Every structure is written in C-alpha cells, then in structure tokens.
Image: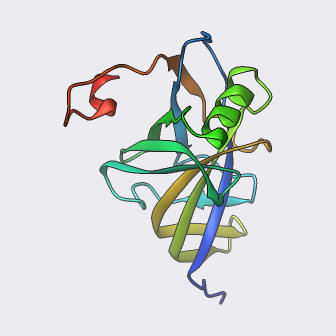
C-alpha cells in the first residue's frame, strides 16, 4: 500500500476572463471544484482545506519573492472561490495585472501543503484528504478547466478597517 508523505504542492487551474476594463484591479473566480480531477491525476476530498474565508498572499508563479497582491479564499464544502486584489503600487503587481488584463496569463495555481492523502486503487490516483492553503499564484500554464474568473472589477475605496472582500 502506498503512503503519502506531507509535502508542499502546487496545482494549476484554468481561468477564463469574461470582463475587462482598463481601470480594474480585482479578479475573482473558482479556484477549485473538489469533484474535478487535476491535471496531475489527483482528486481533492470535499472540504479538505476547511470551510470559511481566509486571506493569503497572491504570488507570481509560486515565487515567494514575487508578491503581486492578496487573495481572499471563500472555502465551501464542494468548491473554493477566490478574489485576487493586485497591488499595482509594486512592480510585480503591476506586471502581473498587465499580463492578466491583456490575456497573456489566464491561469492560477493553488499553493498548499498536503498533510494527508490516500491511494485509490480503483482510480489509480491519490485522493488528497487534508491540507492547508498557503497562497494563490498567477501562472502561465493551464490545468483544471472549471477554475474560471467570474469578473474583473475596479478596486473600491474603503473606510479604514473595512475589508475589501466584503465590498465585492
């Protein structure tokens, strides 16, 4: 029987841009649908990343030295939605935003630590059962077809102490 060893894992997902406006700085979409098979022949057990909202860094190509903004994850039982706020006050944030806005990059990739998984003999693949999200990166390589950007919209001004994800 195969045994899973805890590991850092990145999963690439496809985004489809539906709306575009020169003044916009926020994108949103579906990062993961649990029932969908990944391009790496893995499945994710429903709710394995927990339930609820969390905010983490958004990176360029999983490079921890290339923060482009922040991602707000909305973790549900059957899927995970996201909102990325690009920080266009830093070079990497501006660069990543331009690449997404122009359609040069159309995919994201979940960064996570997979703590446990089970080998499924029938499907001949790993079923991820427990993990922790660490970031969401914009990347140039496509993967899971159902991770779509729902909308791109302008960054909204907020009152001090107010959370941007609540304004979307």
User: Residue 162's image quarter?
Assistant: top left
Q: Residue 52 placed where, x, y %?
A: 29, 48
Q: Is residue 140 left or right of residue 14?
A: right
Rendered residue at 61%/88% (across/down) = 3
Residue 54 or residue 86, whichever sits in front: 86
**Residue 92 versus residue 139: which sits nearer the camera?**
92
Residue 150: percent from the left, percent from the top?
53, 22
At x 58%, y 40%, the residue is: 90
Towards the viewer: 7 or 140: 140
The answer to whether residue 70 is above or below residue 116 is above
Question: On the picture, is 72 further left or further right than 93?
Answer: left
Q: Which residue sits at x=75%, y=52%?
A: 39
- Relative height, residue 110 to residue 150 (above, below): below
Which image quarter is the N terminus in? bottom right
Against 11, residue 80 (above or below) is above
- Residue 21 image point, x, y percent: 60, 9
Left or right, 43 with reference to 38: left
**Residue ID at (35%, 58%):** 50
The quarter in which the C terminus is drawn is: top left
Relative placement, left or right, of 125 versus 148 is right
């Amino acid at each position: 029987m195969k045994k899973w060893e805890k590991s850092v894992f990145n999963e690439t997902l496809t985004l489809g841009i539906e709306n575009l406006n020169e003044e916009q700085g926020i994108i949103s979409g579906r990062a993961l649908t649990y029932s969908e098979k990944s391009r790496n022949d893995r499945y994710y057990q429903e709710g394995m990343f927990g339930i609820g909202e969390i905010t983490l860094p958004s990176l360029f190509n999983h490079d921890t030295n290339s923060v482009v903004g922040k991602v707000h994850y909305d973790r549900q039982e059957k899927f995970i939605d996201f909102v990325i706020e690009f920080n266009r006050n830093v070079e990497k944030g501006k660069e990543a935003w331009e690449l997404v806005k122009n359609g040069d990059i159309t995919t994201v990739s979940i960064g996570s630590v997979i703590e446990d998984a089970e080998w499924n003999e029938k499907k001949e693949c790993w079923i991820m059962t427990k993990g922790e999200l660490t970031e969401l990166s914009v990347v140039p390589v496509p993967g899971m077809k159902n991770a779509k950007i729902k909308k791109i919209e302008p960054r909204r001004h907020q009152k001090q102490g107010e959370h941007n994800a609540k304004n979307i």
